[in-house]
């Protein structure tokens, strides 16, 4: 367990956390403003990645594919909103869960029919494909640093958008009391639609950024969706700031736990049981963290005001 | 006094109680006759399919208890199936292959997990509850995938079905079919009695208006926790049956999609009816069986159907039938 290894894992954890934030930000916005549970968020992340792969095949250039895929993801989100989601806003959570579950089933298998079950790859742009030396004998892939930078940039952009623009003010007001905002003459349906489309674009962006590292395959969003839920529950539903803090926390705890749990356990037990128990404990760590946070603060760390 | 609040007009009450008797009686009559019918027509797969339906119906009935009557939308019930199944698998791998030990352990494991997570989950409400049960379910899933000595990702094959006090009672598929049927009947009767009891009335009252129940003087959270724990234990029973039926356990049993399927089942049948959960389990698994003969990616058809059901057919299949029934009744 050298210092360099710890640093690499901290960076990996940070990169994972930033990725979680990209997903959780849209999810928490949609939930905060519309009181809407969207299980289909994970497949929207997946669709973003698939769209990027498709447009890469057309343009042969990562950045062109990124731009086109983001636009397509936005349109896709608006279409979903128009076809299904807007009919569900007034329904209870059970109906929303069910309908979005149906969308997951459909999209997970629709992409399998269109692009096949085999994992696809999205090549990363040449400019960012190498590794750089962080310190003596410590190489780190540039692309992971790009993900961290992109995530931080989105976080900053969201902060400005939500805290310092009129649209952001409406979003915050909507999260606090949607009915009041509507009564004050704001077209809440249009606000919902914008937030939803924007959220889909964010999820798609996360999918595209991670695609060069992971493979693009059906169901790739299923497990990360649950992690995003853990993030927004810990952070406090509806709070961008909470989602940011919780995402970094979860990213670090999960990555470091998986890397070092066996080493740490070997300090107190024999190597063989440590190798068995370590991974199990590591996979439980973030959920235990969630349980502890919720036991003491049932509304999360930074509950949105007015809820 | 609490009774007066829930008193129903007598005519509607009679209608309700007649339906309450007829539908389950029909369901169980059909289930009893399936093996004979399958033997007569030489369609062995009917027994396997119906056994599978009944195993998931046990879990669906238990889930309906918390969702339909308690208003607690648990999205982590597959974890209890998994715990029950893994209890059988792990005990069998360690050389303990008797139901007299495996069954109590399976139910106890699920009950204990429900109790611990229930304390945390019930501190929260609404959407938080959904997401947290989802997260705890996922936790157990990942623990199972990291259990390298017991198969990890690949799952664990069980050498033989459990014996009962040394006797191979589960060995024949037809025998085991009736064991499953008895389990379902017991689960159903127990839940039916439970929701009709004072405990069930408090649970239903808390679903409609928790603060009113608290004002009357009930410790709402304690009632909900007991309901959640009972449901978890019964779902563990379903896991015990599933592991014995397939002679295999795998983390896939408790992926969150499985929890979603259980919710689909109770919604298909109509929530808060208990017998609807059995019908829903049958409808879902038969639809899966049938659609997968049409296309490998049958979910492409089933997903949109599900969305349409949510948007246009509230109350599920039973709700549709009731509406149809009422319309006919109005003309006669």
Image (cartoon, coloured by chain):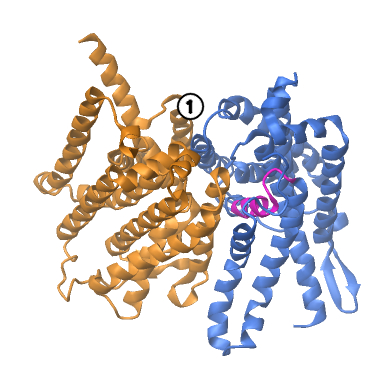
User: Is A234 included in the stretch rendered in magenta?
Assistant: yes
- Which secondary structure lies at badge 1? helix
Q: Position of residue B257 (x, y in %)?
A: 48, 50
> Chain ID for label 1?
B
- Of all chains in the rendering, the one displayed in orange is B
Residue of label 1: B311
User: Which quarter of the picture shows residue A139?
Assistant: bottom right
Residue at the far top: name it. Answer: B331
Q: Nearer the viewer, residue A213 or A269?
A: A269
Q: Chief secondary structure of the magenta span?
A: helix
Q: Position of residue A26 (x, y in %)?
A: 71, 42
Q: Is residue A288 visible?
A: yes
**Relative to residue A257, is residue B210 drawn left or right?**
left
- Of all chains in the rendering, the one displayed in blue is A
User: Is B218 included in the stretch rendered in magenta?
Assistant: no
Q: Nearer the viewer, residue B328 or B155?
A: B328
Q: Position of residue B168 (x, y in %)?
A: 16, 71
**Relative to residue B116, is residue A66 drawn left or right?**
right
Instruction: Estimate how packed mark 1 is, as few (under 14), some (14 to 19) or many (20 or more) residues with alpha carbons within 10 Å.
Output: some
Establish if B235 lies above or below B65: below
Chain part drawn in magenta:
A226-239
Residue drawn at point x = 60 percent, y = 44 percent? A43
Residue drawn at point x = 36 percent, y = 64 percent? B84
Establish if B104 lies above or below B283: below
**Numbered label tally:** 1
Residue drawn at point x = 85 percent, y = 57 percent? A128
Q: Nearer the viewer, residue A184 or A271?
A: A184
Q: Quadrant of the C terminus of chain A?
A: top right
User: Which quarter of the picture shows residue A160?
Assistant: top right
Q: Nearer the viewer, residue B307 or B24?
A: B24
């Amino acid at each position: 367990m050298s210092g360099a290894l710890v640093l690499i894992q901290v960076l990996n954890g940070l990169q994972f956390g930033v990725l979680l934030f990209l997903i959780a930000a849209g999810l928490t916005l949609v939930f905060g403003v519309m009181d809407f549970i969207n299980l289909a968020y994970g497949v929207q992340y997946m669709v973003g990645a698939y769209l990027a792969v498709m447009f890469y095949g057309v343009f042969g250039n990562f950045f062109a594919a990124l731009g086109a895929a983001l636009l397509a993801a936005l349109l896709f989100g608006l279409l979903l909103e128009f076809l299904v989601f807007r009919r569900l806003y007034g329904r209870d959570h059970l109906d929303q869960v069910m309908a979005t579950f149906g969308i997951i089933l459909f999209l997970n298998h629709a992409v399998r029919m269109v692009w096949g079950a085999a994992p696809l790859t999205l090549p990363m742009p040449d400019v960012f494909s190498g590794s750089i030396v962080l310190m003596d004998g410590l190489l780190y892939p540039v692309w992971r640093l790009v993900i961290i930078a992109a995530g931080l940039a989105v976080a900053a952009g969201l902060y400005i958008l939500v805290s310092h623009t009129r649209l952001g003010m409406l979003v915050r007001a909507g999260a606090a009391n949607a009915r009041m905002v509507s009564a004050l003459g704001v077209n809440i349906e249009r606000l919902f639609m914008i937030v939803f489309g924007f959220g889909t674009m964010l999820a798609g962006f996360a999918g595209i950024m991670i695609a060069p590292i992971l493979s693009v395959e059906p169901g790739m969003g299923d497990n990360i969706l649950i992690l995003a839920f853990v993030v927004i529950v810990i952070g406090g539903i509806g709070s961008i700031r909470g989602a940011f803090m919780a995402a970094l926390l979860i990213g670090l705890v999960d990555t470091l736990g998986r890397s070092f749990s066996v080493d740490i356990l070997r300090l107190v037990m024999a190597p063989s049981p440590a190798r068995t128990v370590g991974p199990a404990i590591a996979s439980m760590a973030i959920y235990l963290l969630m349980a502890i946070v919720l036991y003491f603060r049932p509304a999360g760390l930074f509950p949105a005001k007015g809820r | 006094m609490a009774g007066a609040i829930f008193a129903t007009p007598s005519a509607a009450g009679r209608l309700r109680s007649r339906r309450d008797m007829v539908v389950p009686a029909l369901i169980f009559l059909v289930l009893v006759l399936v093996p004979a019918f399958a033997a007569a027509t030489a369609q062995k797969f009917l027994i396997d399919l119906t056994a599978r339906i009944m195993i998931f119906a046990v879990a669906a009935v238990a889930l309906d208890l918390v969702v339909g009557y308690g208003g607690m939308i648990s999205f982590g019930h597959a974890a209890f199936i998994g715990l029950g199944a893994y209890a059988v698998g792990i005990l069998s791998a360690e050389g303990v292959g008797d139901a007299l030990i495996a069954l109590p352990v399976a139910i106890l494991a699920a009950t204990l997990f429900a109790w611990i997570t229930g304390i945390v989950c019930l501190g929260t409400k609404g959407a938080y509850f959904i997401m947290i049960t989802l997260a705890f379910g996922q936790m157990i899933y990942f623990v199972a995938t990291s259990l390298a000595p017991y198969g990890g990702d690949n799952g664990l094959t069980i050498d033989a079905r459990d014996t009962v006090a040394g006797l191979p009672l589960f060995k024949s598929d037809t025998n085991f079919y009736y064991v499953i049927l008895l389990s379902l009947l017991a689960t159903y009767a127990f839940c039916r009695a439970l929701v009709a009891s004072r405990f069930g009335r408090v649970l239903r009252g808390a679903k409609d208006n928790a603060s009113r129940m608290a004002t009357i003087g009930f410790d709402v959270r304690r009632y909900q926790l007991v309901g959640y724990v009972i449901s978890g234990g019964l779902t563990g029973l379903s896991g015990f049956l599933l592991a014995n039926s397939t002679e295999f356990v795998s983390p896939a049993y408790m992926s969150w999609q499985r929890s979603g399927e259980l919710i689909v089942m109770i919604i298909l049948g109509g929530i808060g009816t208990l017998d609807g959960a059995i019908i829903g389990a049958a409808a879902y698994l038969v639809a899966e069986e049938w659609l997968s003969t049409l296309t490998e990616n049958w979910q492409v058809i089933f997903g949109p159907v599900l969305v349409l059901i949510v948007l246009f057919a509230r109350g599920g299949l039973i709700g549709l039938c009731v509406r149809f029934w009422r319309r006919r009744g109005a003309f006669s």
